[in-house]
Image (cartoon, rainbow, N blue to C red):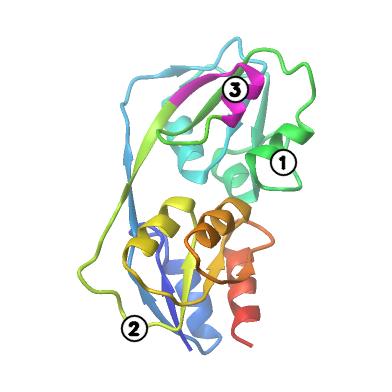
Amino acid sequence: MRILLTRPEGRNDELAERLRAAGLEVECEPLIALEPIGHEPIDLEGYDWLLLTSATGAKELRRRAQGHPKRVAAIGPATAEAYGPVDLVPRVSTQEGLLAELPRPAGRVLFAGAEGARRLLVEELDADFVPLYRTRELRPDKLPDHDLVVLASPSAARAYGTLERRKPVVSIGPETTAATEELGLRVLQEARTQDVQGLADAILKATR
């Protein structure tokens, strides 16, 4: 079984090592690249909640943060780990899941994430939004041969869809699954947690 990992450059290594140790053949071909936006400090003082929806955003905000919000919510365990101590990690790792568990009234809210992130949190909470990075979809000239592809973001799903490959998919979570299925691709497994362990477990289950 040949597994294709598609996360950005440098973010496939730990997962690839685990899969190879389990006897799987692994290839890596990034389908997205992440580019930081700006370097100026971001003032967090005065916010009742800071909302983070990706590990990349969490790392970028730590680099640029000035002051501290009262509370922090992270969409999943990997995002929480990337940021540090947080006050809320919802059971369902989607914006809808975060909204369902966020105490109301939420007060003054800052949503920090990708330039093209869904604006559900902004619309529902009247939140301020700051873009921390942009995602650029890649189109490699040739993909390595594979039997199963691992997609870890909706943008990676869209990038894979443009390549007209129809291999089964392991998805990192609900939003990626939805984007993948919209393209007519079959999702064999969805990770139960949005981290390396969750992906590894889902891939091993899909290959049994």
Q: Which residues are magenta?
A: 120-130
Amino acid bearing label 2: Asp
Residue drawn at (67%, 16%) of the image: 48
Which comes sooner in the sequence, label 2 or label 1?
Answer: 1
User: Circle 2 is placed at which residue position?
Assistant: 145
Marks 2 and 1, how far apart in space? 36 Å
Vertical arrangement, residue 166 with respect to residue 73, above or below: below
Residue 106 relative to residue 182: left or right: right
Q: Are marks 3 and 1 in contact (CB under 8 Å)?
A: no
Q: Which residue is mark 1?
A: 97
Residue 154, image x, y percentages = 48, 52
Is residue 87 shown to the viewer in this render? no
Q: x, y percentage for residue 96?
A: 69, 38
**In front here: 125 or 46?**
125
Residue 204 lies left or right of residue 34; in this view the side is right
Report if residue 104 lies within the magenta region. Answer: no
Tag nearer the camera, 2 or 3:
3
Foreground disc of the pair 3, 1: 3
In the rendering, at what x and y percent does residue 12 appear?
42, 65
Q: Is residue 180 visible?
A: yes
Residue found at x 23% / y 74%: 142
Residue at image position (78%, 34%) is 101
Q: Circle 3 sits on which residue?
A: 123
Q: Nearer the viewer, residue 141 or 24?
A: 141
